[in-house]
């Protein structure tokens, strides 16, 4: 599915910049705005967007939420104050629950994610017009997130399945047999000059511990680095 990130009437350039930056972090290729109150390509917006300034320069601007969501198969509203939605409104869900529901959506669908105003969020009427309403659980003492921070959490939760295989491969690289053999040789050499009565037994214990822990290639490399002279 494709996520269409729609920011409604943003007021501060710094937030606009951070929104662009975090969107690029999670592979979002285009941004959409509804009646922005701050200049999208203002100096602060560009500065805080870092290497994602092209998302602001190429952003599409709409005059209404209705226009912005016309192509969307599903529209998800966001709120930091869930009480804005009528208490009988059954479609409000925590972020993680919303992400789980999206797994059932057609992969060709366009899912609109409405990010409310930096100062007042989405109105109750705008929330009522959404297909789903999403709430990020935070401290009751200060429940309302900055819109760029909220978007970061949303995009992480919505896209993490796309990135997990990549980082799993990096952190859990399988260890090769020759690496283990090299590690054991280095360990044996390191204990030869030590006053150990039964070096053979110590070596055997080390081998058993390493094999039982099923280390990754990265972990074996770290041990080799530590034991090498």
Image (spheres, rainbow, N blue to C red):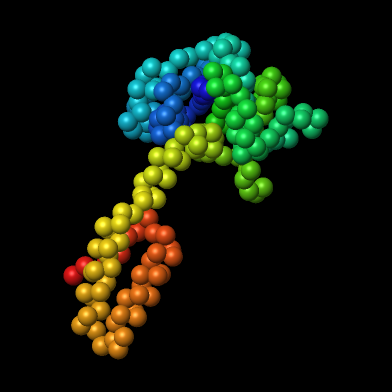
Q: Is residue 47 visible?
A: no
Q: Establish if 65 lies above or below 134.
A: above
Q: Quick one: quadrant of the C terminus?
A: bottom left
**Residue 67 relative to residue 127: left or right:** left
Residue nearest the viewer, comparing 36 with 109: 109
Q: Establish if 208 lies above or below 62.
A: below
Measured as percent of width and height from the top left, residue 141 is found at: 65, 49
Q: Which residue is drawn at 57% across and 25% down?
A: 113
Q: How many labels does the image show?
A: 0
Residue nearest the viewer, comparing 101 with 33: 101
**Residue 58 relative to residue 67: left or right:** left
Q: Residue furthest right?
A: 88
Measured as percent of width and height from the top left, residue 82 is found at: 70, 35
Q: Which residue is drawn at 65% across and 37% down?
A: 97
**Residue 41 relative to residue 123: left or right:** left
Residue nearest the viewer, comparing 87 with 63: 87
């Amino acid at each position: 599915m494709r996520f269409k990130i729609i920011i409604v009437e943003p007021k501060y350039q710094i937030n606009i910049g951070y929104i662009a930056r975090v969107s690029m972090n999670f592979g979002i290729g285009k941004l959409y705005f509804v009646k922005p109150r701050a200049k999208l390509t203002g100096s602060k917006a560009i500065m805080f967007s870092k290497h994602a300034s092209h998302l602001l320069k190429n952003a599409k601007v709409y005059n209404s939420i209705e226009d912005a969501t016309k192509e969307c198969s599903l529209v998800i509203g966001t709120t930091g104050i869930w009480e804005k939605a009528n208490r009988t409104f059954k479609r409000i869900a925590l972020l993680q629950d919303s992400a789980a529901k999206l797994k059932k959506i057609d992969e060709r669908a366009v899912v609109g994610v409405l990010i409310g105003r930096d100062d007042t969020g989405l109105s109750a009427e705008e929330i009522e017009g959404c297909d789903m309403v999403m709430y990020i659980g935070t401290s009751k003492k200060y429940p309302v997130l900055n819109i760029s921070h909220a978007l970061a959490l949303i995009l992480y939760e919505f896209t993490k399945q796309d990135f997990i295989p990549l980082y799993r491969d990096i952190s859990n690289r399988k260890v090769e047999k020759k690496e283990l053999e090299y590690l054991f040789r280095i360990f044996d050499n390191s204990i030869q000059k030590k006053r150990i009565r039964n070096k053979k037994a110590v070596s055997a214990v080390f081998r058993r511990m390493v094999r039982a822990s099923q280390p990754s290639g990265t972990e074996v490399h770290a041990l080799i680095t530590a034991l090498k002279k």
